Amino acid sequence: LEGKISNPEDVRKALTSTKAQAIFLTTTTEMPVMGGATGGFQSAEDEEYETIVQWFKTLQEVHQEDKLPRTVVFSGRDNVQELARKKYEQTGNVWIEPLDDGSVVPHYSAKGKGGEEGLKLLQNTPGLNLIQLTMPFFYSNFLAFFCPLPNDGRTQWELSGCFGSGDTKIDMMAVTDLGALVVNVMNQAEKYKGQILRVASERISMNEIAKEFSDLFGKDVVYNPLLPKELAALEFPSAPAMAQMCQFLGDSRELQHDLELTAELMKPRKLANFETWLLTHSDSTAFSRVGLDRDAPELTKICVFGALSPQGKSVVKGLLADVRKSYTIRCTTRRDLDTNPDVQELIALDPQRVSFVQADFDDIDSCTNAVQDMDGAFLVADLQESLKTTDLETEERHVKNIIDACEGRVR
């Protein structure tokens, strides 16, 4: 059937023509799609809420006419706006800063308010049974807004969000488990009539998510904790609402989902965890698009600026000790290469892999020559190895010269 869930006549037609007695209801929030938008969220929330309420009213009207018993499983969320209001009344502190139009996690709150109203409408209507599944964070978000994004050299990927600490546990599940879950709930409709079931398959942190990405793809994937205002400012559609959602999910509160109940509802099947979900989605175009499934450029030729400083020496020794790769290391210093004992000491660690060139940080050409044919470079911000000065402007100029020398020449 073709129709709009927001159109009562289309809803009526679907109910009467199918005579369906088992119904799964899910709605979407038509939030602003322009990146950087800060308004229009409350109106989107109101529109979805009104759609949900009108749907239940239409259901009541049809039921009065045909008297068919019906079970509705509604895909809901938490009414975060109301939760935030209550928390403010209790503490006097703003928990989640409302958006410019006053909304708080609109795509959650609309469903939360709609589900609450639906339960009120149907609780005294014999023959109509409503069960709400309060959904957690879906793994599929990692195919979209929360897909790991690479740096310019594609040597590290970041999962950016404002979930708080990377160790904060978040309730999650695979949307693909909903089919079996909903069927099993409908088969036990009388047991769960009028209830709100908070479902999830596991409680997992963003650091653990990042590790699963790293282990599967062999890439350096890390969680990048942002402030809510930083995430809200990103040029993604609905970023402000996403930032509120992350803040809500990352907050340590008592609104946890029931893992034991969800596992029981899925029997005899087992719920997917993130590890298995990621494995089955590893060939997704979302991950291909960001280069997770490609081999990173091999970085084996490294230039170490300021190699005779304590940090520089440590880096050289660390590269030599790394058993995963065999690095060729080009060190720089302003000192005499033939007579300086520190130069000879580093070369002696592995003469086949360690070499020195002279480079003056005031001379960008010498720095450019130093990085020629190199894959990567390490520089010490405090360049006191060759200078007896605490002039910050000088150090800043030296760092800029080295970065300019590397631009376009190292990977």
Image (cartoon, rainbow, N blue to C red):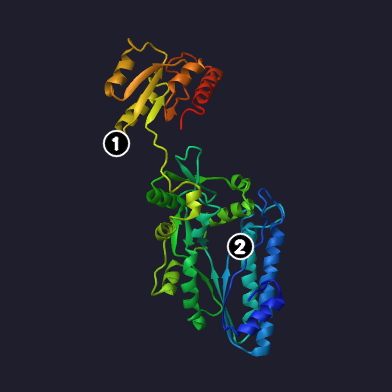
Q: Secondary structure at mark 2?
A: helix
Q: In the image, residue 342 lies at what x, y percent?
A: 33, 16
Horizontal relation, residue 334 to residue 4: left or right: left
Residue ID at (50%, 15%): 363
**Closer to us: 88 or 339:** 339
In this rendering, which labeled residue sits more in front, label 2 or label 1? 1
Q: Is residue 134 above or below residue 294?
A: below
Residue ID at (50%, 65%): 175
Residue ID at (68%, 89%): 65
Q: Which residue is mark 2?
A: 108
Q: Secondary structure at mark 1?
A: loop
Horizontal relation, residue 372 to residue 353: left or right: right
Q: Which residue is mark 1?
A: 323
**Closer to us: 297 or 349:** 297
Q: Residues within 10 Å of mark 2 (few under 14, many from 20)?
A: many
Tell me the quarter of the image containing the N terminus: bottom right
**Closer to us: 112 or 278:** 278
Asked where in the image residue 245 lies, by quadrant, the reply is bottom right
Horizontal relation, residue 59 to residue 151: left or right: right
Residue ID at (49%, 14%): 389
Q: In the image, residue 97 lies at what x, y percent?
A: 65, 52
Q: In the image, residue 409 lies at what x, y percent?
A: 48, 27
Residue type indicated by callout 1 = Val
User: In the rendered image, is residue 93 in sight?
Assistant: no
Q: Is residue 115 above or below residue 89?
A: below
Q: State the CA–CA distance, disc 2 to disc 1.
A: 49 Å
Q: In the image, residue 72 lies at what x, y percent?
A: 57, 78
Residue type indicated by callout 2 = Tyr
